[in-house]
Amino acid sequence: MSKDGLWVLAAVISILVACAVPTPEAGDKIGAEPRVAVAATSWPVAWLVEQIAGDRVDWRGRSMLDLERGQAPSADQLLELATADRIFVQGAGWETWREIASLPESRVVDTTAGVVLIEEEGPTHSHGAEGEHSHRRPIPGTWLDPELFRGQARKVMEALVGASHDEAAKALLVERHAALDRTLVTLAADLRSVLSAAPSGSHWGSAGPGLEYLARGYGLELEVHELLADAAPDEHETGHVRAWARSGAPAILLWPKPPVAEVAAALDGSIRHVVFDPLTAPSPGGRYDWAAGMRANLERLHAAVSEK
């Protein structure tokens, strides 16, 4: 489809979405109160909603969760999204499609609103008299810093309480949020404890971007390398990684998934390779559990920093 065609489609979708009205289904009740219809645009945010609301909400647009960053939803997906009373978005540049498709803003809850965002250079493009250039754009991975994720959880709770008209339901939402907050506080403390146990002078690297908020929140000087877990790096990048690994201190390299043997062999043998799941999608078993995934990340980190 041409660029003009995309903009026409976006305009049509925006009109349809803006006109969509949530329609509670028959029998959807919490006692005498209709269920709040909710939608989310990322797995981490959907997990927060589920932890706080349990099964006391009516989910809309679940297929949106499987969209990757930069992938545009279909018109049908957007229309279903717009039937929700509360649309919980990750924000921080995750939903790039929102630049061309509008949502009913009065029902949108941006869970990263107010967060000091980290930016990256966007793809290079050319238009107008400026010629070839790029724009900086925010990085979305706030959920990998448990402290920032606590803030996102609070926004979810406040929005759900605001959508409820039953005092008992509100009290339950607040109670469930308090339990979730305790879990996040514990994980934040455990993460800090694991990182502080690393050998003195340890230096940290990652096989690609995505851990910027984790690094900022926990004081890690993280060197980002251009590596793929299933493709051996070129000689230039290999030399760069080897130089980084041989600086005299333990080198801990974080990967989004396990590197194949060929890749690990191409790098310095002294590197401590650690899988740190970015927690953007369900596990291979099909279930998404942010807390379990972060706990597994901490266990792998602990094994790496404890290595003799």
Image: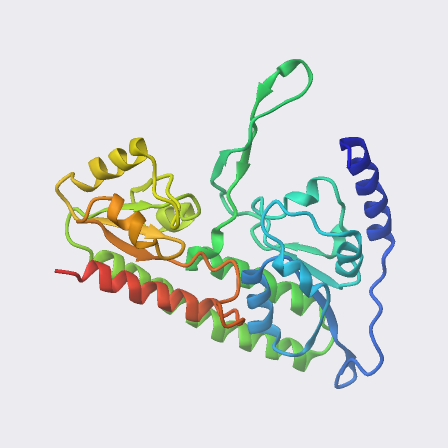
Q: Residue at x 82, y 64 (%)?
A: 22
Measuring 58% from the left and 60% from the top, which residue is drawn there? Answer: 155
How did the renderer colour the structure? rainbow
Q: How many marks?
A: 0
Residue at the extreme front:
262
Q: What residue sits 56% from the left and 67% below the top? A: 47
Q: In this view, does 304 lie to the left or right of 224?
A: left
**Residue 76 is drawn in which quadrant?**
bottom right
Q: Which of 110/243 is in front?
A: 243
**Along the viewing direction, whichever of 138 and 161 lies nearer the viewer:** 138
| Picture layout, residue 47 above or below residue 144 | below
Q: In which quarter of the image is the N terminus?
A: top right
The residue drawn where x is 23% and y is 59% is: 304
Which quadrant: the C terminus?
A: bottom left
- Quadrant of the image occupied by residue 274: bottom left
> Considering only vertical position in the picture, is 132 above or below 300?
above
Q: Can residue 190 be seen in this view?
A: no
Pick the residue in front: 107 or 19: 19
Q: Where does residue 259 sit, x and y in percent of width and height?
A: 34, 53
* Residue 168: % across, % down: 66, 82
- The foreground one among 279 and 156 is 279
Residue 56 seen in this snapshot = yes
Give x and y (percent) for residue 137: 55, 36
Give the percent coordinates (x, y) of residue 197: 20, 59
Dividing the picture into quarters, in which one does residue 277 lie?
bottom left
Horizontal side, residue 131 vs residue 285: left or right:
right
Looking at the image, which residue sits at the far bottom? 31
The answer to whether residue 156 is above or below residue 210 is: below
